[in-house]
Amino acid sequence: QVQVVESGGGLVQPGGSLRLSCAASGSIDTIFRMGWYRQVPGKQRELVATTTSDGVTDYVDSVKGRFTISRDNAKNTVYLQMNSLKPEDTAVYYCHANVMSQWGLRNNYWGQGTQVTVSS
């Protein structure tokens, strides 16, 4: 059993900053890619940022230069530092982890989501 838990969402004014955290726990052997997705009502979930276990990152164009993804492999944790937030960043943010369990099974795991609202 693997659990993925996010924290750090909330309400922030335009131009402000938030930091999201996500920790994976349970019967983990290896975590491959970890990342953040977001979703607004009526739209598909979109990739925001991902990172491999050796630190290779990728971002959706709309957040490049404003968001930074980082990872602490020792803690099975990934972070998303969000700066210069815009109202269009408002969404539920989901953490994703691609995990090999201790029994050799590889699956995708998702957190429950954390709301980020950018509004004055």
Image: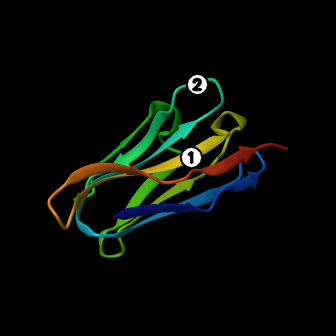
Write the residue at 64% across / 47% down: 84
Dot 1: element: strand
Looking at marks 1 and 2 on the same chain, the residue that comes earlier in the sequence is marked by 2
Front-lying residue, 41 or 119: 41
Task: Identify the mark at residue 43; answer none if there is no mark.
Answer: 2
**Residue at image location 78% in from the left, 49% down from the top:** 13
Q: Residues within 10 Å of mark 2 (few under 14, many from 20)?
A: few
Q: Nearer the viewer, residue 27 or 31?
A: 27
Q: In the rendered view of the protein, which quadrant contains the C terminus?
A: top right
Amino acid type indicated by mark 1: Tyr
47 sits left or right of 53 in the view = right
| Residue neighbourhood size for the residue with mark 1, other residues' Cα within 10 Å, grouped as few (<14), some (14–19), many (≥20) | many
Residue name at image x 26 percent, y 53 percent: 52
x and y percent of residue 18 in the render?
64, 57
Picture residue at 53% right of the left edge, 57% below the top: 81
Which mark is drawn over residue 38? none
In the image, is 7 to the left or to the right of 118? left
- Kindly give the residue lying farthest to the top in the view shown: 42
The answer to which of 41 and 80 lies nearer the viewer is: 41
The amino acid pointed to by label 2 is Lys
Q: Position of residue 76 (x, y in %)?
A: 35, 69
Where residue 26 sits: x, y (%)? 35, 70
* Mark 1 to mark 2 CA distance (whole Å): 13 Å
Q: Secondary structure at mark 2?
A: loop
**Which residue lies under the disc numbered 1?**
93
* Rendering coords of residue 1 (x, y %): 34, 64
